[in-house]
Amino acid sequence: MPLMTKDLIRQNYRKLRRSISSAEKTISSYAITKIIINNNNNLNFYQKKIAVYLASDGELDLRLLIEALWKNQGNVFLPVINATTQALEFSPYFPETLIKINQYGIHEPESDFFVSPEGLDVVFMPLVAFDKTGARLGMGKGYYDKSFAFCAESQIKPILIGVAYSCQCCDKLPIDHWDIPLDGILTEKEFVMFNRKS
């Protein structure tokens, strides 16, 4: 049986993601925060430059995790689309940071200071679907794949962790040569690393 196209998979899993109840979303947000806190001794998240996102379109909400990082002096960054390069830059994110809404309805910080993707240690990435090999399907614009394309060649690179509800796991995703695989996946049920980093 042939694989479904990315567009069809994206359509189905976006609908599934948006159908999750408010109560389930809240429980899942607490769950992923607890999982990361419990894994901090292994990965030392609080001492690193960590990129997060502000949820939209039914994505798993990271606000509780962000607050935990702030509480423990974490260096938190949000993605901003560079209008010229059409790639992502990352701006520091604090409780007092002013936020604007970009052309896709996504919340971005109002800032003139940015860190390049190469300057990050850990990136929590939103996604539409994933599979157990670490393949990731995003919204289709390719911003994360373009921004982290250097990871395919570089020895020094951030840890890329996809964040999703467990129901967003797909049996097998079609992949293209430009797709950047995840190093780990975080859901409300588990945190799995794929052992790609040395």
Image (spheres, rainbow, N blue to C red):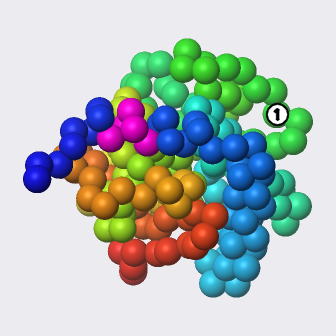
Q: Residue furthest left?
A: 1
Closest to the observer: 9 or 65? 9
Q: Quadrant of the C terminus?
A: bottom left
Residue 123's spot in the image, x, y percent? Answer: 55, 55
Q: Residue at x 11, y 53 (%)?
A: 1
Relative to 85, is 21 on the left or the right? Answer: right
How many C-alpha atoms fall within 10 Å of the one at disc 1: few (<14), some, or many (≥20)? few
Q: Residue at x 71, y 49 (%)?
A: 25
Residue 108's spot in the image, x, y percent? Answer: 66, 29
Q: How many marks?
A: 1
Closest to the observer: 54 or 168? 168
Q: Residue furthest top?
A: 103
- Label 1, secondary structure: give it: loop
Q: Residue furthest bottom?
A: 41
In the rendered structure, which segment of residues is drawn in magenta? 9-13
Q: Quadrant of residue 94?
A: top right
Q: Residue at x 21, y 43 (%)?
A: 4
Closest to the observer: 37 or 88? 37
Relative to 10, is 14 on the left or the right? Answer: right
Residue 58's spot in the image, x, y percent? Answer: 61, 38
Q: Is residue 116 magenta?
A: no
Residue that badge 1 annotates: 97
Q: Residue at x 82, y 61 (%)?
A: 68
Residue type indicated by callout 1? Thr
Let me know if residue 132 appears in the view.
Answer: yes
Residue 76's spot in the image, x, y percent? Answer: 71, 51
Does the magenta stretch mainly form a helix, a strand or a loop? helix
Is 123 located above or below residue 84 in the figure? below
Q: Quadrant of residue 132?
A: bottom left
Let me know if residue 61 appears in the view.
Answer: no
